Image (tube, rainbow, N blue to C red):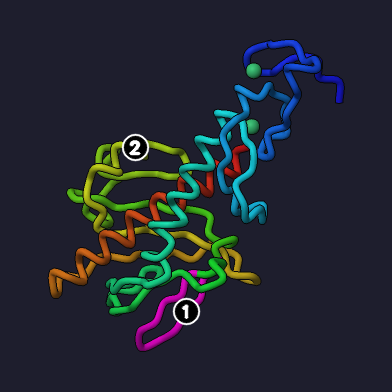
Amino acid sequence: MMCPRCMQCDAKFDFITRKHHCRRCGKCFCDRCCSQKVPLRRMCFVDPVRQCAECALVSHREAEFYDKQLKVLLSGATFLVTFGDSEKPETMVCRLSNNQRCLILDGDSHHEIEIAHVCTVQILTEGFTPGVEKDIHTYTSLLGSLLASEAGSTRATGMFLQYTVPGAEAATQLRLMAGEDANGSKRQAAAWLAAMHKATKLLYESRDQ
Ligand SMILES: [Zn+2]
Ligand SMILES: [Zn+2]
């Protein structure tokens, strides 16, 4: 690719101003504009690699997520789970599978939902009453990135998922609500939902790129 100038500051490349490629977006930059070395895990680089400022910011956020949130998602939390229009919620532990490809629900029954089959994720926050008409102030649609940042400061109380099952025509609906039992498990559930919220944002941001 012909690339005579830094794509950030427009410096001309020569023997002194050397050309570097961002390992994330592949664009050309001078040393100054592409100096940050950040782990880029989803592309299988274990060691920090050179990235431009814009990409470094995204990668920093991803690295932070991996370190802090992944542990929370893998360890799981207890929820009251309702499938479809079933009346009776079931107490289940929901966690991310070790290979990070499935949500696993364990209670009297066992369910595995492939992340790739999830089409809608909505984090329900305090003040939202399930079943009532959508209220834009308390209802966060992550697909539309609606109020995603505002929801981060509000306590998450539940999650609504829609996913497809191979062979089935309509999407299956699933609602997880933090239980009303011991305070500890409710805190754990809120932490799990917050981690899921961040994971979903990263997922859609990376799909958009
Ligand atoms: Zn870049
Ligand atoms: Zn530059």
Q: Does the magenta portion include 102? A: no
Q: Amino acid at mark 1?
A: His
Q: Secondary structure at mark 1?
A: strand
Q: Position of residue 66 (x, y in %)?
A: 47, 56
Q: Position of residue 146 (x, y in %)?
A: 39, 37
Instruction: Please tell me which residue lies in front, 80 or 187.
Output: 187
In percent of the image, x 37 and y 72: which residue is there? 75
In percent of the image, x 59 and y 53: which residue is there? 41
State which mark lies toward you, 2 or 1: 2
Q: Does the magenta portion include 107? A: yes
Q: Which residues are magenta?
A: 103-114
Give the labeled residue for mark 1: 111
In percent of the image, x 59 and y 60: which residue is there? 116
168 over 200 or under it: above or below: below
Q: Position of residue 153 (x, y in %)?
A: 24, 42
Ligand 1 placement by image quarter? top right
Q: Secondary structure at mark 2?
A: helix
Residue extending farthest right: 1
Q: CA distance from mark 2 to mark 1?
A: 30 Å
Badge 2 local density, few (<14 within 10 Å), some, or many (20+)?
few
